[in-house]
Image (cartoon, grey):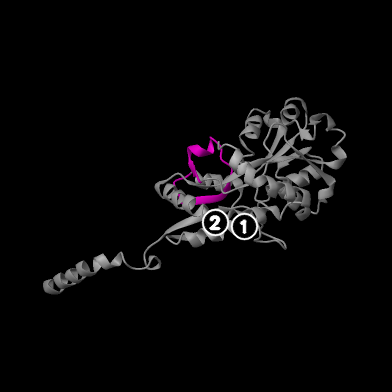
Amino acid sequence: MAGRFIRALRRLWLIAPLLGMLPLSSQAQDTLTWLVRDLPPMTIFEGPQKGQGSVDKLLPLLIERLPQYRHQILHVNRARGLQMLNTPSFTCDPSLVWTPVRARNIVFSAPAFAVLSNGIAIRRNQQGALASYVVDGQFDLARFLDLQQMRLGIVAERSYGPGVDEQLNHADPLKLAPHYGNDALGSLLQMQRLGRLEAVLGYWTEIRYQAAQQGIDPQDLVFYPIKGTARYQRIHIGCSDTPMGREAITHINRELQNIPQETLRQSYANGLDPLMREQYLKDNPRFFSETPLP
């Protein structure tokens, strides 16, 4: 019995060096969980353009280039996604805005692509009542939050960019209507339609898409950029700030350099109206080269 055991150990010792030469697929792999939310035109879960968003196009390219991991995709809302990223897990989100607060617990990639910044959507029949807050085609959000006894709908735990986030953080909580659900923006648009809030904060492309999903005519809405904000903002990939998350970001940064930006730009631009699309495609290369990183 002892002799057979010793011979078995010798055989194991002889083949052990060969285990490292086996294909990656035959070895145990860590599972990277991608946290994805419905955010047209970056990710599109339903409708004729399902799977045609810029992140919908980016994610398979990244997964193909990261064979050292097993990948799974999990659909989450914004609040749940951030909760998972802020815990010791191996999770990544392919569509995150960088903020100083998030950077405390999330490790960010280099910029993946740029999108039109968030703005304010109001009902067309409310233009007169809110006209004093629109200056040179831009909405004065700071003044609206400071003076107006009206409510602003926001998606809970979403970043709208550092400048807008700062204004929201200092606003009277009674003037904000945060929504935590999976269909947060659609629910906010319904609340707006029913007169329960006056303005909704979000991406115009996403607002138009969600309005149509809710049976609301996008033509009944008017969108304004926010005074003092940049026209575009960068989107990053963010992973949990753990050893595996940091290692993954290193690989992701390398692969982002090899993915043609034109593919991502065009996928995002396809979700814009013709005038916005033309301007976005014209501005995009200059934005990346001329705008400093945060």
Give the number of the disc on residue 229: none
Horizontal arrangement in the rendering, residue 221 relative to residue 118 (left or right):
right
Q: Quadrant of the N terminus?
A: bottom left
Q: Secondary structure at mark 1?
A: helix
Q: Position of residue 117 (x, y in %)?
A: 68, 41
**21 or 212, nearer to the observer:** 21
Quadrant in which residue 140 is drawn: top right
> As rendered, which of 64 and 183 lies closer to the eye?
64
248 relative to 196, above or below? below
Q: Are marks 1 and 2 in contact (CB under 8 Å)?
A: yes
Amino acid under label 1?
A: Thr
The residue positioned 52% from the left and 58% from the top of the image is 62
As for residue 280 lying within the magenta part, the answer is no
Q: Residue at x 74, y 52 (%)?
A: 209
Q: Which residue is mark 1?
A: 263
Can residue 108 be seen from the camera position used here? yes
* Percent x, y of residue 18: 27, 68
Look at the image and give the residue range highlighted in magenta: 87-109
Dot 1: few (<14), some (14–19), or many (≥20) neighbours within 10 Å?
A: few
Q: Element at badge 2?
A: loop
Amino acid marked by disc 2: Ile
- Alpha carbon distance from label 1 to label 2: 8 Å
Mark 2 surroundings within 10 Å by alpha-carbon count, few (fewer than 14), some (14 through 19), many (20 or more): some
Residue 186 appears in view? no
Quadrant holding the C terminus: top right
> In this figure, which residue is indicated by the disc labeled 2?
259
Residue 4 locus on image (x, y percent) = 15, 74
